Image (spheres, rainbow, N blue to C red):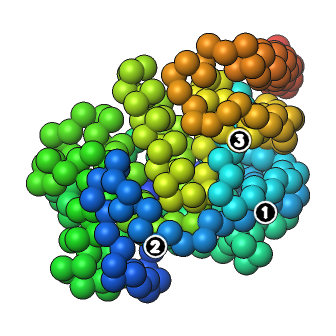
Amino acid sequence: MSNCIELEKADDPAAQVARTVNVAPVSFSKNSSVANADSANAANVAAKKAGAIFLQNVDVCYGSGAKAVRAVQGIDLEISPGEFVSVLGPSGCGKSTLIGAIAGSTRIARGAVRLDGEPVRKPGADRGVVFQQHALFPWKNVLSNVEFGLKMRGIARAERRERAREFLNIVGLSDFLHHYPAQLSGGMQQRVSIARVLVNQPRVLLMDEPFSALDAQTRLQMQELLLELWSEFRMTVLFVTHDIDEAIFLSDRVIVLTQRPGRVRAEIPVLLPRPRLPDTLTTRAFVHLKKQCMDLLREENILARRNNCAQQRTREAELEPAISVS
Ligand code: ADP
């Protein structure tokens, strides 16, 4: 594992905030105005072209030497512009690592990551990221949080205010512009997170278990909101989850990763009709897909447990001579 790379810790909230913000200049269409999520005007928002994601033979390692951890290995993945793809896999198999590699915040040890043919080298607002825990500034109100990225990119105050209001309206938070993150429910905080990313008009939306901390009912509401936003703006979405129902409900395709180091174990097309509605969850076709995913994940979890036991035995065997000598 000599080619493993030392990486910065990925869980610093300030770093997460920085990663969702772009500094590249952007210009908005003058007449792009959104009234609310139900409004036909929403389609007027000048959506940028959805991005094509391409990963070839990607390895990511953390640390170096004997303590190096190979998180993912030999990942080949192509995601078409506007496609909605979910990633499932055992805990610790490298799902978040994949998001980091595409976001440009995690360096790859081998292979290639491209967005629309261009190598990904660093974060940018063409790839918005939404994390499980919101990365909002606690000292800024909702409106200021959403306009922050635009401010960093030099957009004039009046325009960025207008844009932030539009996107907060779209996610149903127009009555909470002056609230602070701590005054909002978990679902509302995630709505703000999504608005803050969408206001930058990303070509790709990367979501790392964004709804995992929410109760079941709020989660379903957020899933439906996300599908509405996706059909409105048509960005490419890569969605990491450990929830099989969520992956199938949302996606055009589900990628199942192996235990760590994560490799692509299966790609399952989800040909369920859209729009997806709560009733979709109980259809025969849905249940069939769910069983397919469950069987694959169960196998991977069993393999992961066996591997852990084998590693534990090896460690004990290495320690044994030292114990018997003492
Ligand atoms: P998942 O999202 O599937 O749970 P991750 O991508 O978070 O998995 O992690 C994959 C593996 O890499 C895990 O074994 C994890 O402990 C390790 N890992 C993740 N981030 C770091 C880091 N910053 N330093 C060292 N190891 C890490």
Residue at the (47%, 45%) spot, across then down = 228
- Callout 1 environment at 10 Å: few (<14), some (14 to 19), or many (20+)? many
Q: Give the vertical position of 115 relative to 84 (above or below).
A: below
Q: Earlier in the sequence, mark 3 or mark 2?
A: 2
**Secondary structure category for the residue under label 2:** loop
- Report the front residue among 262 and 237: 237
Q: Which residue is mark 1?
A: 54
Q: Is mark 2 within 8 Å of ligand 1?
A: no
Q: Which residue is mark 2?
A: 46
How much space separates mark 2 and mark 1, taking CA atoms? 25 Å
- Callout 2 environment at 10 Å: few (<14), some (14 to 19), or many (20+)? some
Quadrant for ligand 1 reads: top right
How much space separates mark 3 and mark 1, taking CA atoms? 17 Å
Residue at the (77%, 75%) spot, across then down = 117
Residue 187: where, in percent of width, then height?
33, 35
The answer to the question of whether label 3 and label 2 lie on touching residues, with beta carbons closer than 8 A, is: no
Residue at the (67%, 15%) spot, across then down = 283
**Secondary structure category for the residue under label 3:** loop
Q: Which residue is mark 3?
A: 252
Q: Give the vertical position of 309 relative to 154 (above or below).
A: above
